[in-house]
């Protein structure tokens, strides 16, 4: 059985959803999918909205003692991607970082990032979907814990 890594989470009190892609602890993913209740972005803007979600996600994990022992002080074991509309952030302990061109997280991040960079340079005409598929396939080829099939989701 394969674990689903990307989840559509409906917005509370509004239409639409966010996509949350999790790496790392399965327990963290389960808690976030069940208990994270994102509201639609308000007048503060998307950056502060994503930061609020990163803090809420971190607090949910810390309340349940799901921590990253490698992190100084035992921060929340949060390694995720948050997508809303055309926007993407990396979520880590108490922090939402906007993504520019591309990013990869998890155990295959180095291989996937290398593939994304190589494709950006050698095949700039390539659409995002095949780029992501090739990057995940590159990560799977170099890491035993990563396997397909690759499933793409969009907001």
Image (cartoon, rainbow, N blue to C red):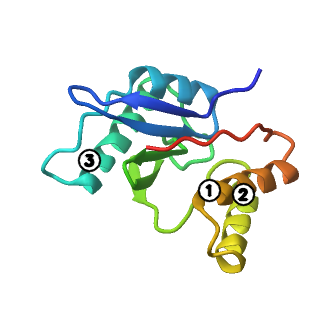
For the residue labelled by badge 2, is the local secondary structure a helix, a strand or a loop? Answer: helix
Q: Position of residue 21 (x, y in %)?
A: 54, 40
Query: Which residue is painted at 56% across and 48% down in the image?
Result: 71
Query: Which residue is painted at 63% across and 27% down in the image?
Result: 26
The answer to whether marks 3 and 2 mark residues whose Cβ atoms lie closer than 8 Å is: no
Q: Position of residue 110 (x, y in %)?
A: 72, 61
For marks 3 and 1, give the CA distance. Answer: 22 Å
For marks 3 and 2, give the CA distance. Answer: 29 Å
For the residue labelled by badge 3, is the local secondary structure a helix, a strand or a loop? Answer: helix
Residue 49, numbered circle = 3
Give the quadrant of the C terminus.
top left
- The part of the image, by quadrant, that contains residue 12 is top left
**Which numbered disc, 3 or 2, marks the residue that appears first in the sequence?**
3
For marks 2 and 1, give the CA distance. Answer: 9 Å
Residue where numbered disc 2 is placed:
135
Give the quadrant of the N terminus.
top right
**Viewed as shown, does residue 85 lie left or right of 44?**
right
Residue where numbered disc 1 is placed:
104
The answer to whether marks 2 and 1 mark residues whose Cβ atoms lie closer than 8 Å is: yes
In this view of the protein, which residue sits in the foreground, 41 or 63?
41
In this view of the protein, which residue sits in the foreground, 15 or 35?
15
Against 51, residue 35 (above or below) is above
The answer to whether marks 3 and 1 mark residues whose Cβ atoms lie closer than 8 Å is: no
Q: Is residue 93 visible?
A: no
- Mark 3 Cα-neighbour bin, 10 Å: few <14, some 14–19, many ≥20: some
Q: Nearer the viewer, mark 2 or mark 1?
A: 2
Query: Which residue is painted at 26% across and 47% down in the image?
Result: 49
Q: Is residue 42 visible?
A: yes
**Which numbered disc, 2 or 1, marks the residue that appears first in the sequence?**
1
């Amino acid at each position: 059985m394969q674990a689903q890594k990307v989840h559509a989470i409906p917005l509370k009190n509004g239409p639409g959803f966010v996509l949350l892609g999790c790496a790392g602890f399965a327990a963290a993913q389960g808690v976030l999918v069940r208990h994270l209740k994102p509201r639609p972005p308000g007048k503060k803007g998307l950056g502060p909205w994503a930061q609020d979600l990163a803090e809420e996600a971190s607090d949910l994990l810390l309340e349940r003692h799901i921590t990253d022992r490698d992190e100084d002080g035992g921060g929340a074991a949060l390694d995720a991607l948050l997508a809303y509309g055309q926007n993407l952030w990396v979520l880590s302990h108490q922090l939402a970082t906007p993504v520019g061109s591309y990013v990869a997280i998890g155990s295959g991040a180095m291989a996937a990032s290398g593939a994304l960079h190589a494709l950006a340079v050698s095949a700039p005409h390539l659409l995002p979907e095949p780029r992501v598929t090739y990057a995940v396939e590159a990560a799977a080829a170099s890491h035993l814990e990563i396997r397909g099939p690759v499933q793409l989701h969009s907001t």
